[in-house]
Image (cartoon, rainbow, N blue to C red):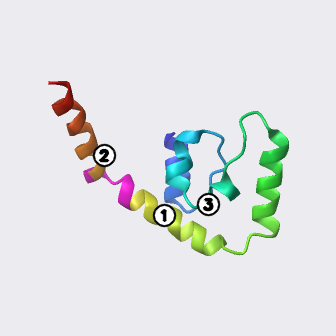
Amino acid sequence: DKTVLESTAMGVPPFVCNEVFRETLKPYGDVLMFHEGDAEMLAERMMYYLQHYQGKTELQQALIRTVQVRHNLEHVVAGISQLFVWQK
């Protein structure tokens, strides 16, 4: 999980099969997500991105913004705090 967020924060598109990231990668899931164990689909996604995808700059900027907004320290601390409040 951390590797995907680090990649995303740098604007490097992560190709993932874990559904946990569908919301984070929205609306780019069709480009960046593949089915678990499907190496052919992963290769197709990567080749499409590298050779044909026209929105690379937009995607990279959107990924960086997503991490800045959803995964900044303030947001993470607030989420962790809610866990402790909920458990009481």
In the image, which residues are magenta?
Answer: 69-74
Callout 1: helix, strand or loop? helix
Upstream in sequence: badge 3 or badge 1: 3
* Lower position in the chain sequence, tag 2 or tag 3: 3
- The image position of residue 86, as x and y in percent, is 20, 30
Q: Amino acid at mark 3?
A: Tyr
Is 72 a magenta residue? yes
Eyeballing the image, is 82 above or below 15? above
Which SS class for mark 2? helix
Left or right, 16 with respect to 65, comes to right
Residue bearing the label numbered 3: 28
**Which mark is first along the chain, 2 or 1?**
1
Q: Distance between the Cα atoms at labels 2 and 3?
A: 23 Å
Residue under pointer 1: 64
C-alpha distance separating marks 1 and 2: 16 Å
Q: Amino acid at mark 1?
A: Ile
Q: What secondary structure is marked by label 3?
A: loop
Q: Is residue 52 magenta?
A: no
Residue depicted at 67% across the width and 49% down the height: 33
The residue tagged 2 is 76
Left or right: 27, with 49 as reference point: left
Q: Residue 32: where, in percent of width, then height? A: 67, 54
The image position of residue 77, as x and y in percent, is 25, 44
Few, some or many residues within 10 Å of mark 1 (<14, 14–19, 20+): some
